[in-house]
């Protein structure tokens, strides 16, 4: 055991000695490496310092060269600016010299003008003084001559003036009468031509549709069996319908149709609409008939009022009484010689406005009178007086102005005309009713009138073709250039 322990101790001592020797050798190698690294770093630092010194010297040389170049450029720029400034100063001095010479010339001219004005002023003063002297002399001569004339004529100045005025007054009265007669004749000669021009201008500016209505209305039926239901048992339905509407209902052999006959277009329209609703509904008996007729009559009244209001708005007429507005709307269901009365009234109103404007009158009042001129044709009852008189009374009742009332009453010469609106309304009413196509006429007669119009124009020398257009309201004429001269065109 002691031997083994001794061997172990020896081995341990050897191992410790070897470790210490290795550590000493490692430490020595580390110190040598550190020393070499230190020497390498010192060498690199020395090289870097030399390179930095070289770069700094090169930068200083470059900066010095750039500084010299900048100084040279600055000197050149200063020299250039100095040359430009000297040139500009020289030019300004030359300009100032020219302006000074111009100012001197103007001053010399002004001095000359001033001298001339002074001389002219002296001459003018002399002339004024001479004129004053002559005026005094003329007044003296005039006074002396007046004294001589008064002694010779045995009239004073005032008496002579009165005598001359009285003599001239008689001559003027005679000449005035002659001229008035001549002017009256000239006005009469020109009146016809101007009236034609105004009327043709008004016609050319108004366009209206052609409307043709009759005294009967036809109601279509879905089948002929419906006729029996409309007649009813022992005719009670048709009697109830005729009693409620006041329209005669004709049931004949016309297939799938019934004819309504009556001169009152409003009642006829109520009957047509009521019958149409009854046919669609299918329930046809006296109580239902009275209910539907009452409902349709209310609808027609509302439509009449709405039509009157819309017409007044379209024509720019304001302040019209509600009853007159209702009558205007009622015109929609009235016709005169096949011409719809509301369309005729609107056309007449526009014609009146255009004509009044050409004559220098108020076009709004003329348009109002034109719209209301036939208001007497749509009464709620049947008056026994002419429609123009009845319309005038209605207008007076609803506070229309006197000249408008007179225009309504005088458009058929029932009363005397008291304003210029009256003849305008009368003429425009005739224009609207008499234009081709406005009222019912035979087609052959209408075509013949157009042909006669074209032939009348063709009868003039130089005219080679004519065309009646716009329902005969315009005649287009083509003239041969080789058949008539420019001077003859005016008379044609």
Image (spheres, rainbow, N blue to C red):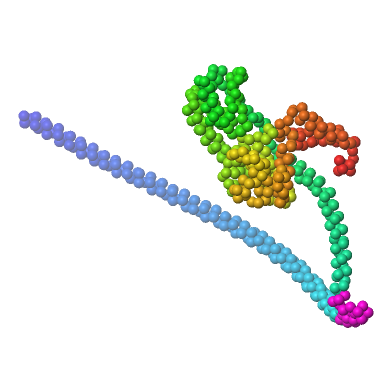
- Estimate the x, y position of residue 39 in percent, counting from the top left: 37, 46
- Estimate the x, y position of residue 88 in percent, counting from the top left: 70, 63
Answer left or right for 485 relative to 401.
right
| Residue located at (72% from left, 49% from top) | 417
Answer left or right for 421 relative to 49.
right
For the N terminus, give its image quadrant: top left
Q: Which residues are magenta?
A: 136-160
Q: Is residue 336 magenta?
A: no
- Estimate the x, y position of residue 248 in percent, counting from the top left: 59, 27
Q: Is residue 143 magenta?
A: yes
With respect to residue 148, does 230 lie above or below?
Answer: above
Most frequent secondary structure within the magenta stretch: helix
Q: Is residue 346 visible?
A: no
Quarter occupied by residue 453:
top right
Quarter occupied by residue 154:
bottom right
| Residue located at (51% from left, 33% from top) | 294
| Residue located at (81% from left, 73% from top) | 113
Answer left or right for 126 relative to 210.
right
With respect to residue 76, does 424 lie above or below?
Answer: above
With respect to residue 51, does 340 lie above or below?
Answer: above
- Estimate the x, y position of residue 143 in percent, counting from the top left: 88, 81
Q: Nearer the viewer, residue 252 or 427?
A: 252
């Amino acid at each position: 055991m002691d031997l083994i322990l001794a061997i172990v101790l020896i081995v341990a001592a050897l191992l410790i000695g070897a470790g210490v020797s290795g550590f000493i050798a490692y430490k020595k190698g580390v110190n040598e490496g550190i020393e070499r690294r230190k020497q390498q770093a010192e060498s690199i630092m020395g090289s870097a310092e030399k390179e930095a010194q070289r770069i700094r010297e090169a930068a200083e040389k470059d900066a010095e060269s750039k500084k010299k170049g900048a100084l040279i450029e600055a000197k050149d720029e200063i020299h250039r600016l100095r040359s430009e400034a000297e040139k500009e100063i020289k030019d300004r001095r030359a300009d100032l010299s020219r302006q000074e010479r111009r100012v001197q010339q103007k001053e010399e001219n002004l001095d000359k003008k001033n001298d001339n004005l002074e001389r002219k002023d002296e001459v003018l003063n002399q002339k004024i003084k001479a004129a004053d002297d002559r005026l005094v002399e003329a007044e003296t001569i005039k006074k002396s001559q007046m004294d001589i004339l008064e002694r010779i004529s045995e009239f004073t100045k005032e008496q002579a003036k009165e005598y001359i005025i009285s003599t001239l007054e008689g001559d003027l009265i005679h000449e005035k009468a002659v001229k008035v007669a001549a002017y009256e004749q000239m006005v009469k000669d020109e009146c016809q031509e101007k009236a034609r021009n105004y009327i043709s201008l008004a016609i050319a500016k108004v366009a209206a549709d052609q409307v043709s209505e009759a005294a009967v209305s036809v109601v279509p039926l879905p089948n002929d069996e419906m006729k029996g239901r409309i007649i009813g048992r022992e005719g009670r339905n048709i009697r109830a319908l005729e009693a409620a509407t006041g329209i005669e209902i004709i049931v004949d052999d016309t297939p799938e149709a019934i004819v309504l006959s009556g001169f009152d277009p409003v009642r006829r329209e109520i009957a047509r609409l009521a019958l149409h609703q009854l046919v669609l509904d299918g329930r046809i008996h006296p109580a239902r008939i009275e209910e539907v007729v009452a409902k349709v009559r209310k609808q027609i009244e509302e439509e009449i009022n709405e039509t009157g209001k819309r017409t007044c708005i379209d024509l720019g007429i304001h302040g019209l009484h509600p009853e007159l507005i209702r009558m205007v709307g009622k015109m929609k269901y009235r016709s005169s010689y096949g011409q719809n009365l509301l369309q005729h009234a609107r056309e007449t109103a526009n014609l009146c406005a255009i004509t009044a404007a050409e004559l220098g009158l108020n076009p709004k009042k003329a348009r109002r009178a034109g719209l209301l001129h036939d208001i007497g044709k749509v009464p709620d009852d049947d008056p026994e007086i002419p429609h123009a008189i009845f319309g005038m009374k209605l207008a007076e009742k609803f506070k229309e102005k006197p000249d408008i009332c007179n225009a309504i009453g005088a458009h058929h010469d029932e009363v005397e005309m008291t304003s210029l609106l009256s003849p305008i309304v009368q003429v425009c009413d005739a224009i609207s009713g008499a234009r081709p196509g406005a009222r019912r006429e035979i087609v052959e007669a209408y075509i013949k009138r157009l042909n006669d119009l074209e032939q009348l124009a063709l009868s003039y020398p130089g005219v080679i073709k004519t065309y009646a257009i716009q329902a005969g309201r315009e005649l287009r004429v083509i003239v041969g250039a080789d058949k008539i001269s420019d001077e003859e065109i005016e008379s044609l």
